[in-house]
Image (cartoon, helix red, strand yellow):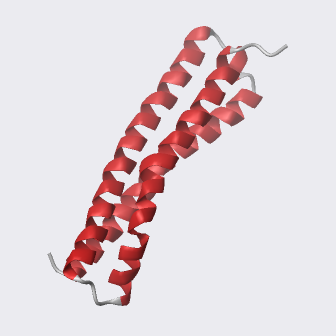
Amino acid sequence: MTEQDLVAHWAVARRHIISAQLGPIILLTSTIALLQFGLADAPLAVRLAAAGILLATGILGAAAQIASANEGGAVAADLKRIGATSALGTAVIAAGPWVNIVRIVTPALFVLIFIALIVALFVPFE
């Protein structure tokens, strides 16, 4: 692949990372809002369904993010290997290590937020 092809692939991987985050963000935020309107007091089946939807969306979103981050890291490594000469190619190489945030930190944050929401859904606080 040429430097231009690799930079184009980097842009696609970055768009996939961003779009993979939208579903979980919207659902996590919506769940927090619904908790304010009584979701924690809903029947058990409704709370289990909400937890399952959050979990499934989080797993799928994390899988897409990790796959795209792996591709982005591979692009950065390939650009470094071929000796990128453009400013954009050099910037992609410099950004390469940051894909580990998407690969590790973002899924870890989802897990922590998911646990907090599970507690809010199923542990009575009175």
User: Quadrant location of the C terminus?
Assistant: top right
Q: Is 83 situated above or below 65?
A: below
Name the image quarter holding residue 46: top right
Name the residue at the top extreme.
Answer: 44
Q: Is 62 situated above or below 87?
A: above
Q: Is 115 situated above or below 12?
A: above
Could you tell whether 91 is left or right of 120 in the image?
A: left
> Residue 43 location, x and y as percent?
64, 10
> Residue 84 location, x and y as percent?
27, 84
Could you tell whether 5 is left or right of 39 in the image?
A: left
- Residue in the picture at 41% in, 56% down: 17
Could you tell whether 22 is left or right of 37 in the image?
A: left
- Residue in the picture at 61% in, 35% down: 113
Name the image quarter holding residue 44: top right
Name the image quarter holding residue 76: bottom left
> Residue 111 location, x and y as percent?
54, 34
Name the residue at the right extreme.
Answer: 126
- Residue in the picture at 70% in, 36% down: 33
Q: Nearer the viewer, residue 61 or 106?
A: 106
> Residue 77 location, x and y as percent?
27, 68
Q: Nearer the viewer, residue 11 or 104?
A: 104
User: Quadrant location of the N terminus?
Assistant: bottom left
